[in-house]
Amino acid sequence: MAQNMETLFATLNNLVQPVCFLQNGVVTMCNSACKAIFLAEGVSADGLLGDVILPKGSEKVSLPCHWGETRYTATLQSWEDGHLCFLAKQEQFSPTAPTLAAVRSMTPALEELIHAGSELFPMLEEQEDEHLQGLTATMCHALFRLMRASNVMGDFFRICREDSVAHREKVALKAFFDDFARYAKDVLADAGYPLIYTGPDKLKNGTLDTLEVQTAMLHLLSNAAKFSPKGSEIRLTVTSLGKTMRISVQSAGVMEEDVLPSAFCRYEHPEHLDSRQGAGMGLALVQAVARRHGGSVLLQAEETGTEVLMTVDVSQPESPVSDKMVPVFHGFDPYLVALADILPTSTFDSRNIDL
């Protein structure tokens, strides 16, 4: 085995990407790129990755981590009697003023579209023409997708800023997650994806920024549906572990190997994005919400599907009321807005949705 690893690392020394080998909870081998960032043999796996369950068999795990002052995405896979760990650097995101201004400039145009639609659609309904009704549903669906894109960018810029903090409020946790699952189940059913939910088994209070956590979970469900076969089950499991809530989303979607290392920063690679990935900000946003709640995100990919594990610390004190952000959904159901990319056009028939 030792000779095999030496041969492997002789090849890995040619990579500019840091790669190390973990065995018995310790880094035992490093390539030259690892040593260049002062990551050497003898470092504990916990010191590099935190408290993470290492993958087994063909399973691969991807998670954000820090080394020094730099953020990386670590991708791990089983090898011999240990684990290979590949580190991909994450660029520090810093939205520019022009970019923020461009995002905010979308709001007036959206409000004008909503106002025009609220007057136009009832007139079209009076025609009792199914072709016209189909066109209005298409327009309404497009409007919701535009609202979703605007919200994602606005949330991304706000939540990913280092000087921005979560607004924590006291929450009955079981009721919060149960209510979320009940609404999400109905909307996902309309999209053709059964949601199987298992919630916390006991009553417990804690603190959360409920808007942020709801946003993160909706992104996880949206991703699960986008990359899964139509009609396949999505499993949402929420577990209470002391001061932490553990949120798991499992789906039949299989992540391509070349996507896994950059899953948390796809927006940095726009040339590689496909239509399902949108702007590639979803998992970065989920990561930021988890980090702002003292938690973490772990992505586990297998040949049979994908699981995303998100943890949040619910033991922190409440925030001042004055810090609370006002949600911007233009008065519409946030579930319909957040999941607009996976819902069929028929959901947005103007006879069912009032603008």
Image: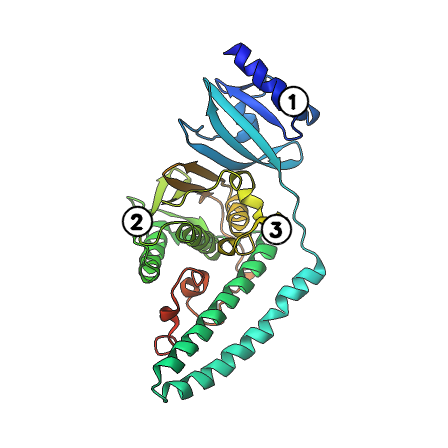
Q: Residue drawn 48% across and 17% down?
A: 24
Amino acid type of the residue that numbered disc 3 sits on in the rendered structure: Glu
Depth check, mark 1 against mark 2: the one in front is 1
Crowding near pointer 2: few (<14 within 10 Å), some, many (20+)?
Answer: some
Amino acid type of the residue that numbered disc 1 sits on in the rendered structure: Asn
> Of the numbered discs in the image, which one, if any, rests on residue 325?
none
Element at label 2: strand
Q: Is residue 30 visible?
A: no
Q: Name the residue under label 3.
A: 271
Residues at marks 1 and 2, CA–CA distance in whole angstroms: 46 Å
Element at label 1: loop
Q: Mark 2 points at which residue?
A: 197
| Residue 38 drawn above or below residue 153 | above
Q: Residue drawn 29% across and 44% down?
A: 202
In the image: residue 53, left or right of residue 100: left
Q: Position of residue 120 (x, y in %)?
A: 46, 85
Q: Which of the image's four quarters has the C terminus?
A: bottom left
Q: As rendered, which of 52 and 268 lies closer to the eye?
A: 268
Amino acid type of the residue that numbered disc 2 sits on in the rendered structure: Tyr
Q: As rendered, which of 207 and 109 lies closer to the eye?
A: 109
Element at label 3: helix
